[in-house]
Amino acid sequence: MSEGASVRVFVITGPSGVGKGTLIRGLFERIPGLELSVSATTRRPRPGERDGVDYHFLTPEQFEERVRAGGFLEHATYSGNRYGTLRSEVLRRLEQGSPVVLEIEVQGARQVREALPDAVAVFIAPPSPEALRERLLHRGTDTPAEMERRLRTAEIELQAQYEFRHVIVNDEVERATEELAAVVRQALARAE
């Protein structure tokens, strides 16, 4: 990937349940032309999720085969499942001239920062650890054991926010979305 292209890569990270997806949907409404890179995962699809749309659902063997072949820009194990950004997904969109948004976990964001130092990384933080716990409880998509694992991981990930130049506290969705859009607009203006 060329250096100029990586300025057109936006990494949105933060703990599970912090509202990354909600903010990204709002971002797409405000800035047309952005493309979301569809991540690959070994976890089972949740009700309503579609392969190739929400995630590329891979078996652990398929995932490992792609790791060995260098097919991932980043990959990580999170809450017992593997997740990754397919290099081909990002390259295809950049070659089409579209800025690319990656919604990934902190481990993966660190890897992208190493591979693409000019990529713009934004950490989404909850207003408090208690608020994050409530969001995960109300989401209702995880078993109690999965939720406890996510909460333990989130505690560690929250410490990582200090590694990021851009940190947005998702305490009020509209304000946080506007702040995220401002970061992206500014970076796109610099890249032109």
Image: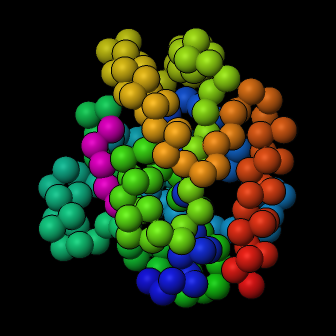
Q: Residue 172 is drawn in which quadrant?
A: top right
Q: Nearer the viewer, residue 190 or 170?
A: 190
- Horizontal relation, residue 30 to residue 4: left or right: right
Q: Is residue 146 visible?
A: no
Front residue of this view, candidates 9 and 21: 9
Q: Which residues are magenta?
A: 74-78
Residue at position x 28%, y 43% in the image:
77
Q: Please check the rendered image and state whether residue 15 is part of the magenta-colored stretch, yes or no.
A: no
Write the residue at 44% across / 27% down: 154
Q: Which image quarter is the C terminus in? A: bottom right
The image's colouring method is rainbow
Q: Nearer the viewer, residue 27 or 61?
A: 27
Position of residue 148 measured from the top left corner of the image (x, y, whole percent): 37, 15
Main secondary structure of the magenta stretch: strand
Figure check: 99 above or below 50: below
Q: Residue at x 52, y 64 (%)?
A: 37
The answer to which image quadrant residue 27 occupies is: bottom right
Q: Does residue 144 appear in the picture of this structure?
A: yes
Query: With 26 as the anchor, is 13 left or right in this view?
Result: left
Which is nearer the eye, 177 or 50?
177
131 is higher (above) or lower (below) than 66: above
Question: Residue 127: where, in percent of width, then height?
Answer: 67, 23
